[in-house]
Structure formats: C-alpha cells, structure tokens
Amino acid sequence: MTDLPRKAVARTARLAALPLGYAGRNALGLGKRLGGRPAEAVATEIQQRTADQLFRTLGELKGGAMKFGQALSVLESALPEDLAAPYREQLTRLQDSAPPMPTQTVREALARDLGPDWKQQLVWLDGGPTAAASIGQVHKGRWHDGREVAVKVQYPGAGEALLADLKQLARLGRTVGQLVPGIEIKPLIEELQARAADELDYRLEAEAQTAFAEAYADDPEIVVPRVVAVGETVLITEWLESPASLAQVISDGTQEERDRYGELFARFLFSGPARTGMLHADPHPGNYRILPAPDGGPGRLGVLDYGAVARLGDEGLPEAMGRLIRIAGLKDRDALLAGFREEGFIKDRIQVDPELLVDYFAPFVEPTLVERFRFSREWMQTQFQRINNPRDPGFAVATRLNLPPAYLMIHRTWLGGIGVLSQLGTEAPFRAILTEMLPGFADPDADPETEDEVEG
C-alpha cells in the first residue's frame, strides 16, 4: 500500500463490504455453534475477525474512512469488555499510524507549495515518514536556519476521498453500527462531515496552531510547536522530539504516567478556549506526545494537529456549560431543567423528568463531586450502558434532548476526552481543574479560600 486509493467505486466497494463480511461471519458462527462449538468462543472469534477487517480497511483507505476509525478509537473505553477486547489492538494502531505514500509524491507537493527552490529552504528531508494519519503524513526535516521541523504533506486526492468516504459511511450508518454496538454512528459521521472542509485547509490549521503556540509559549507543562511555513497541501512546523504518544501510555504506561499525562491532557482541553478562543477538538491519543524531562522529573505534554478546532470566540466555553454542571452536582432538579430549557437543550413543549435529567448528566458530573476522580473503562462502560440501554429509564431522556449547534463539537470533544481519560485510567483533581478553567462552574457565592481548602 503506497498511495491513497482514489477511485470512488473501489473505495465504496471496500466500505460496503464491511457489513457484508460481518453478516457472513455471523452465518459461519451459527454453523459452528450448531456443530457444537461453545457460543462464547465463536462470538469472540467473530469479533476478532470483524475488528481486524474493519480497522485494517479503515486504516488502509485513510481519508474519511480512517478519520471515522480514529473517532471510534477514542470511544473504545465505552464498549463492554467482551466487545472491546478484540478491537483494542486494532484501535490503538489506528490512533498512531497508517501506511505511507511515496517519497516522490512528497517532493512534488513541496515543489508545488514552496516553489522550485524548496530545497534551499528545507535543506534536509527524511526519506521515510515518521507518522501517517487520515489525510496526510509527516516527515522529519531541517529548515535552513538549523531548526528541525515536521513536514506534513496532504495525500493526493485526500479531499475527494474524505468527502466520498463520509458520504458512503453515512449511507451505511445503520449496518456499520452493527460492527461496533454501543456507539452511535450517525451523529459521529454527521460531525465529521460538518468539519471536513476545515480539516483539509492547511492554512486555516496553521492559523489555529499559531494562536495556540503563542498562547502556550511560556507554559511549563504544555508544548505547542510553532508554524514555520504553510501551503495548500504542506504544513511545516517545529519538530517535537518525543519517544511516545498517549497511545503508548494507554497501552503500557505506569500509573504515575497515566495520572500525570491524563491530568495535563485535561488541563489543555479546558485551558485552550480561555487562552485562544478555540477548543482543540480532535482528542485522539496520537495527537498528544510525551516529552520526558531530561533530569527525570515530571514530563511535559506536546500537542499536535490543529485541523479540527471549535472556534468559540473571545468568551471561550459557554458560561452556561459550567453552571449547569455545577447545578447538576447539587441535584437542583428544577434549576437544571430551567437551565436546559434556557440554553435550548429542551424545547418548549417537550417534557422531561428532572430526576432522570440529573442521572443522564452523570458522566459529566460524577468526576466533579470528589477531590480526585479515578477514570476507568469500567466506569465509562457503566455510563454508556445506562444511557444507551432502551430498558433504562434514562434512555428516554436522550430522545427528548436537543443539542444546539454551538455545543455540538464541545459535547463530542468532552465525551471523547472522557473516553481518553478512561482508557488511561487517570486519577486527577478534575473538580479543581473545572473550578479554575471552566466558566460558570465555580460557585459564585463560595469563599475562594474555603474552596481552595476543600479542593486540597
């Protein structure tokens, strides 16, 4: 596999084959069960083969297919363990890798975007990619002033493939959903479609990354590489020397590393909107790099890929967001219901049981009720099973809620962030982080000194 498959018919055929393959394996599994093999063993084998086909196909196609797979990977911790285990290895692989494109294709893009004298600016370029993702891959290089740089080059035909894949996945939403039960596929694909144009625009990405780099220039814990040069399909930024990403910490990190980098991850997500007016909206672990301290002390967190950001404006995250979470934590049911109506989450003629509304909000509220909260796959699975179980009273709440457009990327990013923290198994002072960084969350009537004492 050396280039992005560009023919729409071929891409569509491979995506359409996913649910057909699953159906065929289920039929084969039924035959094996009738032949006497244990049902549990057969189900595990089907799930393993399905995971292998699904994520190998998504990764090889890149484009919208891989973008969809990466979005799923963030929510892996929500799947029940018997379903998640066969997927985990494939999901983690999608978070941090993909097949490369030819070096000649990279050089042609550089000449087109930087001009025929590009070798005088980029004096050295690694022959092979150091990372590859959904719409582009990264090479290490050296700029003419001596700086080591990351050279991100968009795959030829990436725009066409991204849009075509997402359109096809939307058509197959119901059947593809059978491959990953427990995760709502339709809204996930709709969000990816809505932000596709922004992710293809490297100049827009460079603008966002520059704003984040300036905002975090003096931060002792978060590192954002500066933009060096940008063109239509090329983005060059300062190089981050990092031995691993959050994906590796999820896979085999120590508990100390899980707590340290999970807390930095949360702090970055919530501090970004206030500092830049933007929310980094692509929380998959491959975008977060570990930067160990030379003296063996606490490491820093490097943050890459600013193609998906929610542009919130100078006010940052909505004040109502923090206020409603605080009210839900106090279990002030009437105030919570009124606040949801005011913000447009519940339309005028829709009736919702306030008690169930408090329960439905639990995944966002529970981590704020204690001084330090331990995120875990088990906790995340419990939350998702309760919300997505049609027999649970809280399930009806989801069908009555309306998600205003202004909250769409915020909601999905926060949910994805909770998914990553649960994969990490992070224990963090989440309440203190929100008190410091989320508008509206701090009790306006509380004595700051008393609140500091309570939060330790």
Image (tube, rainbow, N blue to C red):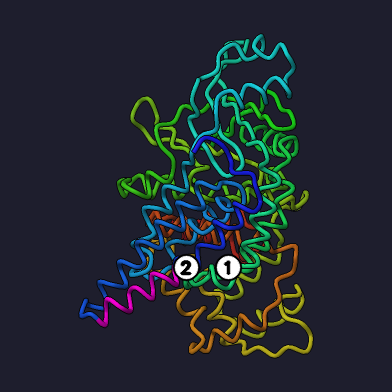
Three-letter residue code for mark 1:
Ile
The residue that appears at 67% across and 22% down in the rendered structure is 110
Q: Horizontally, is 116 left or right of 447 in the view?
A: right
Q: Residue 15: horizontal and vertical position, in percent?
A: 56, 59
Q: Which residue does the numbered mark 1 point to in the structure image?
A: 185
* Mark before the other along the chain sequence, 1 or 2: 2
Query: Is there a contact, CB below 8 Å, between mark 1 and mark 2?
Result: yes
Picture layout, residue 423 above or below residue 107: below
Q: Residue 439: horizontal and vertical position, in percent?
A: 67, 58
The residue that appears at 74% across and 48% down in the rendered structure is 197
Which portion, as a residue range, is magenta? 22-34
Q: Horizontally, is 413 left or right of 363 in the view?
A: right
Q: Main secondary structure of the magenta part?
A: helix
Residue 294 falls in which quadrant of the image? top left
Badge 1 crowding class, 10 Å Cα cut-off, few under 14, some 14 to 19, many 20 or more, is many
Q: Which residue does the numbered mark 2 point to in the structure image?
A: 180
Q: Residue 77: horizontal and vertical position, in percent?
A: 42, 62
Decide which of 23, 85 is in the foreground and name it. Answer: 23
Picture layout, residue 105 above or below residue 367: above
Query: Looking at the rendering, in which quadrant would you find the C terminus?
Result: bottom left
Three-letter residue code for mark 2:
Val
Q: Was residue 282 drawn as part of the magenta stretch in this picture?
A: no
Q: Residue 45: horizontal and vertical position, in percent?
A: 30, 66
Q: Identify the element where label 2 is drawn.
A: loop
Picture layout, residue 408 above or below residue 101: below
Badge 2 crowding class, 10 Å Cα cut-off, few under 14, some 14 to 19, many 20 or more, is many
The residue that appears at 59% across and 25% down in the rendered structure is 238
Q: Was residue 28 drawn as part of the magenta stretch in this picture?
A: yes
The residue that appears at 64% across and 54% down in the rendered structure is 9
